[in-house]
Amino acid sequence: MRIALGQLWQETNTFNPLPTTRADFEQFGVLRGAEMIAAMSDTNELGAFIQSLRAWPERPELVGLVRLPAWPSGTATNETFRWLLDEIVNSLKRELPVDAVLLALHGAMVADGAPDVEGEVLAAVRQLVGPKIPIVATLDLHANVTRKMVESSDALVLFHTAPHIDVFETGLRGARVLRRVLVEGAKPKTAFQKIPMVVPAERANTQNPESVSYAFREHLQALEHDSRVLTAGLATVQPWLDIPELGTSVIVTTDGEADLAEGLCREFSQSVWRRRRDYLPELVPLEEAVRRAHDHSDGLVVLSDSADATTSGAPGDSNWVLHELLKYKWSGPVLVALVAPEVVSAAAKAGVGAELTTPLGGVRDNRFSHPITITARVERLFESKFVISGHLAKNLPIDMGFSAVLRSGDVSILLTTRSGPHFAPEFFRAAGFDPFTARVLVAKSPCGFRAAYQSHAREIMVVRAPGCAPSDFWHYEYRNIPRPLWPWDDDLKF
Ligand SMILES: [Zn+2]
């Protein structure tokens, strides 16, 4: 028994003007064949696939295809898309025949000329292996699931959580579904419902009992405890995708019971639709948020700069929050991060201890913010290299490149060469800070940061500031989305 494993991971934000290229994947860490199996055996979904399959009594042969990961960013170039597809197709062709294919995908990747990258990938894999070989893929909760993805696979297994703390667990669930199909003879019957709505991420917290998504997660997990159900998922979609099939999706796959799948899917879709307004977040105007943070005499205040969330594919060089923070005198460390390769180079050239006057921010994206001039001391130079676990990851190596800390009063500005998890405690520690004892920490993340900070923070505020990943996205220009779609069209019936 030979089972092929592979990964394609990138979340696209079509508002980010920076294209995603082959170099972004190569920098993050492309791995192939046996090297991939060895390196990824305890990391994210691939690690869960590998550990699951190794525990099967049938002792299947693990066939490593390719791991293709890149950090969330702008639309991929068409050349990059063709390279990715070639990598997957050629690696599989070389290994045929296989008895099954298990893929870890994101589900919200867009390339020039290919708005449904994962649909194209799954269709190409199906074309190669034929209709009888099981194909199971895992997807992020923010996937934009399409008909093509559903029709080209036997089952799509979605994350159940946001913050995404079940990445590894989803890999285990994916391998379990494959086992039921491949070894135990289950006959997958999938119901797929597109709900004409797109919701902000801020309140889609599946771990907070007060959040609308909490009960939905519990419901889906209960469905999966029913042995007739192979998998059940809700994808609330990445909102910043200007593409034809944008929308929330529900998928239910049963063992041979098409009517059951349809009924469960329809009923669940209606309950999600009914609660759509509960997803609208309360944003705090930037000036008010910073003033309130300043008013607290102690304790950690976390400000979510969700519109420039690097985990949402935004460029990470919006300076709105920094600009506001610099207006105050603080009584302890204030930590704010930006992607600014030119300023990192200038800081390295000036040297630790030097004073630097430099434009900062508004370069990678210059529509939503513009450079401001700051004067600060170069406090530290470091490598943003660490391993993250928690939201998004289990044991995932990250390398955001050469980095610098600039200091202006109590405000420490962490500048990286590349984008990455500008919310992760491991990132702040790599820069030499204890994130939990800061006065203020700015997380470029809409929701996932809560997994690390909720229990440490005196107050958390999601600020209203401009950026490529705004919460009120329906006020921005989309040209290609299907209409009617809520909340663009408020009077829509479903
Ligand atoms: Zn996600």
Image (tube, grey):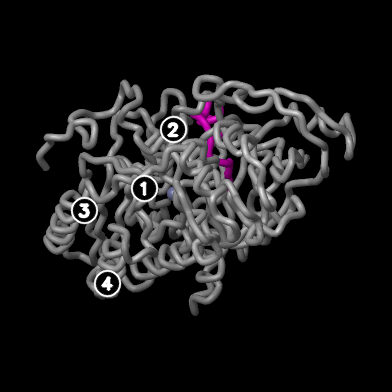
Mark yes or no: residue 127 visible.
Answer: no
The amino acid on which the numbered mark 2 sits, given as a three-letter code, is Val
Apparent side of residue 342 relative to residue 131 in the rendered image (left or right): right
Residue closer to the observer: 241 or 416: 416
Query: Which residue bears the numbered disc 3?
Result: 272
The amino acid on which the numbered mark 1 sits, given as a three-letter code, is Gly
Circle 4 crowding by C-alpha within 10 Å: few under 14, some 14–19, many from 20: few
Look at the image and say whether residue 114 sits in the magenta stretch. no
In magenta, the rendered stretch is 67-83
Q: Position of residue 345 (x, y in %)?
A: 80, 30
The amino acid on which the numbered mark 3 sits, given as a three-letter code, is Val
Return the disc, 4 or 2, that comes first in the chain's sequence: 2
Look at the image and say whether residue 76 sits in the magenta stretch. yes
Query: Which residue bears the numbered disc 2?
Result: 110
Q: Is label 1 in a helix, a strand or a loop?
A: loop
Apparent side of residue 332 relative to residue 265 in the rendered image (left or right): right
Return the disc, 1 or 4, that comes first in the chain's sequence: 1
Mark 2 vs 1: CB contact within 8 A: no
Return the disc, 3 or 2, that comes first in the chain's sequence: 2
* For residue 266, above or below residue 489: below
Query: Which residue bears the numbered disc 4?
Result: 222
Which of the two marks, 4 or 2, is nearer to us in this view?
4
Which of the two marks, 3 or 1, is nearer to us in this view?
3
